[in-house]
Amino acid sequence: MKTFVYWCRENRYLNGNLKLKELKLEEKPVKSLNDAQVKNLLKASQPYPSIKIRILLGLGTGLRRGDIESLKISDIDFEKNCITTSSRKTRKSMGARPVSAVVMQELKKYLDCSNPGQQKLFDDNFNYKQWKKICKKAGLFDLKFHDLRRTFCSVLPQNGVSTAVTQRLLEHSSPYLTNKVYTNFDPVLRQPVDLIPVGDWL
C-alpha cells in the first residue's frame, strides 16, 4: 500500500501528505492439545505406525516435523535415552536432546519392525492423506503437525518447568518466542522431558 501511495504522489495523482494507519493484525491464539485430545490422536494413529511415531516424537520432544523427518537411526542413543540432531530451520546442532524412556521404548518397538540396513528412521515420506484421516477420526479437523510442538511447549510450564529451560528444549532464540508460543544435554533438561505424560497418553 505504501508503495502504491508513493507512486501516486510521484505521478501527481495525490496532493499533500497522506498518512496511512497501520493495522494491527490480531494474533491467533496458540493451539495446544489437552490430554483427552492427545489420547484420541494417538488412538486414531494406531493403524499407521510411522505416523504414530512421528506424533510421539512431536509431543515428547517438541521437534519440528522437518527435523523429525531427517532423523537417522544413528542419531538415536538408546543407552542414554537421547537423540542427536541438527535443526533444518536454524542449521545449528542441537547436541544431544533428552527423550523420555516411554518414547524411547516406542521407538525401539518401531525399529524392531524396520527393514535391515535401514539408515533413516523413516523409510517413507510423511503421508498427508493418512494424517488427515487420523485427525478426522480424532475429531481434530484443523490440527497442524506444529501444534504437537505447541502442546509440548504448554505441558512443560504446567509441570513447573521454567521459561528458560523450555526455551532451550525448543531451541528458541529468545524467551519472548517461547512465551509467545507457548544445546547441550544436561540433567536440567532431562527432568523436564520426563514430566511429559506420554505413558498416560498411550
Image (spheres, rainbow, N blue to C red):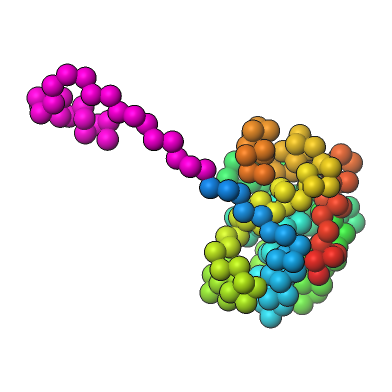
Left or right of residue 196, residue 176 in this image: left
Please count the marks in the image. Answer: 0
| Residue 123 position within the rendered picture, expressed as x and y whole percent measured from the top left | 64, 70
Q: Residue at x 76, y 51 (%)?
A: 155
Query: Foreground residue, 23 or 202?
Result: 23
Asked if 176 appears above or below 197 in the picture, the reply is: above
Magenta part, dominant SS? loop
- Residue at 85% in and 64% down: 199
Q: In what quadrant of the picture does the N terminus appear? A: top left
Q: Which residue is drawn at 81% across and 70% down?
A: 202
What residue span does the magenta drawing correspond to?
1-27
Which residue is pictured at 80% across the width and 47% down the height? 158
Q: Which of 49 and 176 is in front in this view?
A: 176
Residue sitting at the far left = 12
Give the percent coordinates (x, y) of residue 110. 77, 72
Is residue 125 among the parts visible in the rendering? no
Is 148 in front, or is 179? 179
Image check: 157 left or right of 19? right
* Residue 122 in view of the camera: yes
- Dividing the picture into quadrants, the one containing residue 180 is top right
In percent of width and height, residue 47 lies at: 69, 80
In the rendered image, the residue lying farthest to the top is: 16
Q: In which quarter of the image is residue 53?
A: bottom right
User: Does the magenta run of residues contain 15?
Assistant: yes
Write down the quadrant of residue 105 in the picture: bottom right
User: 115 or 37, which is in the foreground?
Assistant: 37
